[in-house]
Amino acid sequence: MASGGTLLFIFTALCVTAVKSVECKTKNVGHYGQQSLLECVVKTSTDAPDPTIRTVAWKKLTSPEDEGDLVLGFNRGKWDRPKRGYRFADPSWDKKNMNVSLLITNTAVADDGDYECIVITDSGDDNVVTTLKVQARYSVPTVHSIPEKIVPNTDSTLICESHGGYPKGTLRWFDEEKYEWTRSSEMEATQSDDGLFQLTSRLLFLQGSTFQKYTCAVFNASGSKEDEIIFEMPAPPRLTPPSEPIEICKIVVRLVVIGSLMVGLLCVLLFCRWKAQREYSFLVSLI
């Protein structure tokens, strides 16, 4: 006579043979603030072509070893109260529907991670783990300078900021010749209460800069550029001759003109005097 354990093993083996498996898409990508779909379908066998689902449990795992936190559950005709934002992908789902895909209606950073789907039918059971990777696009970078008005040949700093992204990205700097200056900068990443990141990068210039334009670009965690902004340094002032020599030149010109007039007048007076003396001498000789 077979033992109870042997009978249980034989029954379980027959059940698992009837329901081949629960097949899920291994990796899923969800976008912050949008719907995310974890696709899972129960695959049946020819031995049990029309099984009835008794239990479906979707659990959010914090680690591969834990039991997980139930987010959506159906057990023997009764629904466990689902967590807000989780439901079956098919709104009209029932126990004869083999599509047990999970829909997250408003994806948050907290939804990132591993999920376990457990299915028990009248012909067998199976469970599988699938992963959701949440992404959020970073905002267009903004750049400002300290001081606000950069003075040539003085120290200055460019500050680039981008926010609202996930996972943690990077800010990178380039000059107008596409040479990268990121190693000369310092970046800080802070995470807000909703899990999104704000990136801040500071690029320091000592005694002015060599190039007229600098580009700050934001890259996501996968290394793809999402957006960029170009910052134009103030143009160097035009070189103009000092005003003091010009004033000196004007004064010299005036003195030369005045001097020339005085010399001319003196010459006229001497000539008139010489002419008068000559006429006087001529008259005296006649007498």
Image (cartoon, rainbow, N blue to C red):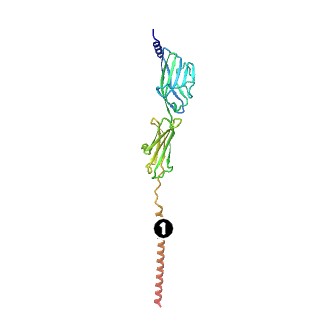
Q: How crowded is mark 1: few (under 14 residues within 10 Å), some or many (20 or more)?
A: few
Q: What element carries label 1?
A: helix
> Where residue 9 sits: x, y (%)?
46, 14
Relative vertical location of residue 110 with respect to residue 148 in this rendering, above or below: above
Residue found 45% across the figure and 43% down from its top: 186
> Where residue 57 sits: x, y (%)?
52, 23
The quadrant the N terminus occupies is top left
Looking at the image, the residue that sits furthest to the top is 1
Q: Mark 1: which amino acid?
A: Ile
- Residue 56 visible in image: yes
Relative vertical location of residue 275 with respect to residue 218 in this rendering, above or below: below
Residue found 48% across the figure and 79% down from its top: 269
> Where residue 6 sits: x, y (%)?
45, 13
Q: Which of 32 and 232 is in front in this view?
A: 32
Relative vertical location of residue 252 with respect to residue 60 in this rendering, above or below: below
Q: Mark 1 points at which residue?
A: 251
Q: Nearer the viewer, residue 286 or 190?
A: 190
Occupied quadrant, residue 91: top right
Q: How many labels does the image show?
A: 1
- Residue 100 visible in image: no
Occupied quadrant, residue 223: top left
